[in-house]
Image (spheres, rainbow, N blue to C red):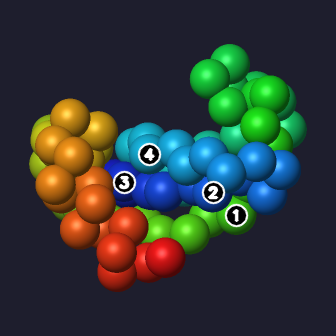
Amino acid sequence: MFYVYLLKSKAVDWKYIGSCADLRKRFFEHNNSKVRSTKNRKPYDLVYYEAYPDKTSALKREKELKNNSSKKEELYKRLF
């Protein structure tokens, strides 16, 4: 399985969208300064995730959320 996930910083008002194959490991890496793009805003809550059967589908969805503001806003309205 592959995952698309949304993290929310506990320290500042900031959200991060990513994808991975091992969600537990990736969440650990985000909270332990192993990811350059998120290390300055930790700690994080895992707010949301979606599971996909293949990497291509997960990457397509991640890109859609990052590049399509209406899709991102739609997701945020459901969650926040």
Neighbourhood count class around disc 3 (C-alpha, 10 Å): few under 14, some 14–19, many 20 upward:
many
Which numbered disc, 3 or 1, marks the residue closer to the eye?
Answer: 1
Please name the residue that numbered disc 2 is placed on.
Answer: 8
Residue type, numbered disc 2: Lys
Query: Judging from the image, what secondary structure is the residue with disc 3 in?
Result: strand
Per the rendering, the mark at residue 70 is: none
Q: Residue at x 34, y 80 (%)?
A: 78
Say which of 42 and 53 sits in front. Answer: 42
Q: CA distance from mark 3 to mark 1?
A: 14 Å
Q: Is residue 28 visible?
A: no
Please tell me which of labels 1 and 2 falls first in the chain.
2
Image spot of residue 21 (x, y percent): 43, 47
For mark 2, give the secondary structure.
strand
Q: Is 66 on the left or on the right of 14, as rendered? A: left
SS type, badge 1: strand
Q: Which residue is mark 1?
A: 45
Whole-number angstrom distance, CA of label 4 to CA of label 3? 7 Å
Give the residue type that dot 3 points to: Val
Callout 4: SS: strand
Disc nearer the start of the sequence (2/4):
2
Residue 13, x across and y down, in percent: 67, 51
Q: Which residue is mark 3?
A: 4
Q: Residues within 10 Å of mark 2 (few under 14, many from 20)?
A: some
Q: CA distance from mark 1 to mark 2?
A: 5 Å
Q: Quadrant of residue 47?
A: bottom right
Q: Are marks 1 and 2 in contact (CB under 8 Å)?
A: yes
Q: Which residue was labeled with disc 4?
A: 17
Q: Residues within 10 Å of mark 4 (few under 14, many from 20)?
A: some
